[in-house]
Amino acid sequence: MNIELQASNIVLARDGMIAIRDARGVRIGCVKGALWITQDNYVQDFIVGPGETHTIDYAGLTLVTALEPTTLSVGEPKPTLTARIMHSIARKLGSSLLLRPAPL
């Protein structure tokens, strides 16, 4: 997914919709109002109310529809545990390589 937002919140009128593709791991939060979240080829839909979030766990098309005037937030995916561990190892290895004296 490649998404760039200029604002931290998005306002949708009633029945306003956002289509998101390939957004596995993205968090949709409802600040005010109510959202209906449905994912292509997914059996279950989700209703998200104020203060609630839903993490998209599907890589296909996701539709987010406002059931009433709604303010929502879209958050970047949280890195997986494996990605966090690999980042930590790379950071430690990188800093230890920087501390080693250069060969003569």
Image (cartoon, rainbow, N blue to C red):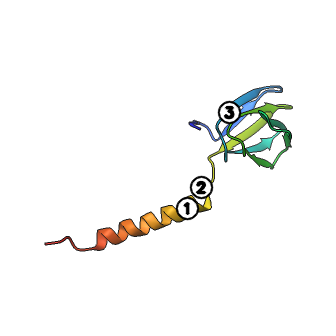
Q: Which mark is residue 84?
A: 1
Q: Horizontal and vertical percent for residue 82?
A: 58, 61
Q: CA distance from mark 1 to mark 3?
A: 25 Å
Disc 2 marks which residue? 79
Q: Earlier in the sequence, mark 2 or mark 1?
A: 2
Residue 17's place in the image compared with 101, above or below, is above
Contact, CB < 8 Å: mark 1 with mark 3? no
Q: Which mark is residue 13?
A: none
Contact, CB < 8 Å: mark 2 with mark 1? yes
Q: Earlier in the sequence, mark 2 or mark 3?
A: 3
Q: Quadrant of the N terminus?
A: top right
Residue 1 left/right relative to 34: left
Disc 3 marks which residue? 20
Residue 27 left/right relative to 7: right
Q: For residue 11, which quarter of the picture?
A: top right
Q: Secondary structure at mark 3?
A: strand
Three-letter code, disc 1: Arg
Residue 99 left/right relative to 59: left
Q: Horizontal and vertical percent for residue 29?
A: 75, 45
| Between 10 and 48, the one nearer to me in the picture | 48
Name the residue at 81% across, 49% down: 52
Characterize the local packing of mark 2: few (<14), some (14-19) or many (20 or more) Cα atoms within 10 angstroms: few
